[in-house]
Image (tube, rainbow, N blue to C red):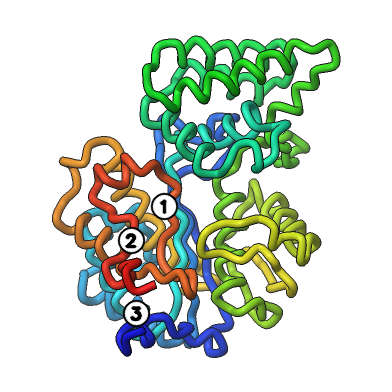
Amino acid sequence: MSKAVEEHVQPLAPLLVRRLYLDESGHGGDVAGGGGFAQQQAFTLACVGVGDTRLLVAELERLRAEFKVPAGEFKAKTLKTRLTPIALALIAFFRAQRWPIFIEAVDKRYFLAIHIIQHVLCGDLNGGYVDQISRNAMAELLADQDAGPAFTAYLEACRAPSIEKVRIAVQALWDWLETRDEEIARTTQILTMFARDRARREDADPLGFLPLADIGPGGRPVWILPNLQCLTNIYARINLWAGRRVKDLQLIHDAQIQYESVLRDAKALMEALGGEGAQVWTPFADYGVKESASLRFAASGEEPCIQAADILAGAVMRCLRRGLEDPALLSEQDEALLEALVDLGNPFTANGVNFVMTARDLERIGVPTVAPHLDPGWL
């Protein structure tokens, strides 16, 4: 291994970073309950590790002066054309300090397609029957080719679960697949046929086709929360980065009035699983959580370092939203941001961005699947 590679894969000083700040951008609410699915296709959760809060606050004030930002909170939604340049400056600052950045970037359409494949088509099958590569290919088919009727019917089944609504959703998926001629569509159709037979049984349970519901505000069930999935994966990435030594870490999330209890419960469940969590395999993450990091929710006025996470989450979400709508809308600054995000990628420390998007969309917006400095040739 070359000296340059050795330097790059060194842990980013986890013993010096004790506080990690998180914020999201793009409606993170229940996709099944609306969740901004049509209006905001992209969702991001950013987490920044900070070794010296005073140093970061000073950098935020320096950026405020440089970009002539009025007094008050730094908020991504108010920075407009200054947002991406400030995000690029923050990325450079964190790299210079060797502090970690973890970002989850989600295309909600693909996120929903994954749930349909996992729960409708593979709900009673283990990974030995349908491998993860095939599952991903089927989800990409639904997302890339916009299986709109199947999406709508499945969301209806989540909102008001009944076996009849599940049967309608399965039939809608079958009918949509009849219009496709891709090879993977035929594989998907075979699994849809099995799901249709399962849904026709007298003892069929609609919950066997749906993701487990969490209890949201007012005791209302919530089914498909991108912020929940993003938080648990970032926690697993932090667990990898810290070598499973997380008991002294503080996770400080921007205030979440609606879903705070759901996020707390998801974190607690990961910790309760202990070693069993290691059986959940996700690239560049470690679900074998052995210790518990603290988690609290705070307003960015109380914890100004949250503003750095807000800026990064907002810049990435808006960049991806433009790219998903039309890659021609991406500016030179957007392209510079995507390049900087890819360059952050380090599988040895889980640093960088996890794009929960189809390979086609990543290619369309110009995101390589391997960072240039991590060419697989040397692995």
Residue at label 3?
95
Work out whether residue 240 or residue 375 is closer to the camera in this orientation and state it: 375
Residue at label 1?
355
Work out whether residue 302 or residue 295 is closer to the camera in this orientation and state it: 295
**Going by the picture, which residue comes out furthest to the right?**
203
Q: Is residue 117 visible?
A: yes
The residue type indicated by label 2 comes to Val
Quarter of the image where one finds residue 296? bottom right
Q: Residues within 10 Å of mark 3 (few under 14, many from 20)?
A: some
Mark on residue 370?
A: 2
| 167 over 127 or under it: above or below | above
Report the mark closest to the observer, 3 or 2.
2
- Marks 3 and 1 sit apart, C-alpha to C-alpha, by 20 Å
Q: Residue at x 27, y 75 (%)?
A: 63
Quarter of the image where one finds residue 313? bottom left
Provide residue 357's location: percent of width, then percent of height.
Answer: 41, 44
Q: Residues within 10 Å of mark 2 (few under 14, many from 20)?
A: few
Give the SS element for disc 2: loop
Provide residue 53's location: percent of width, then percent of height.
Answer: 48, 83
Q: Residue at x 66, y 80 (%)?
A: 245
Instruction: Quadrant for the C terminus, please.
Output: bottom left
Q: Residue at x 57, y 71 (%)?
A: 238
Report the mark closest to the observer, 1 or 2.
2
Report the mark closest to the observer, 3 or 1.
1
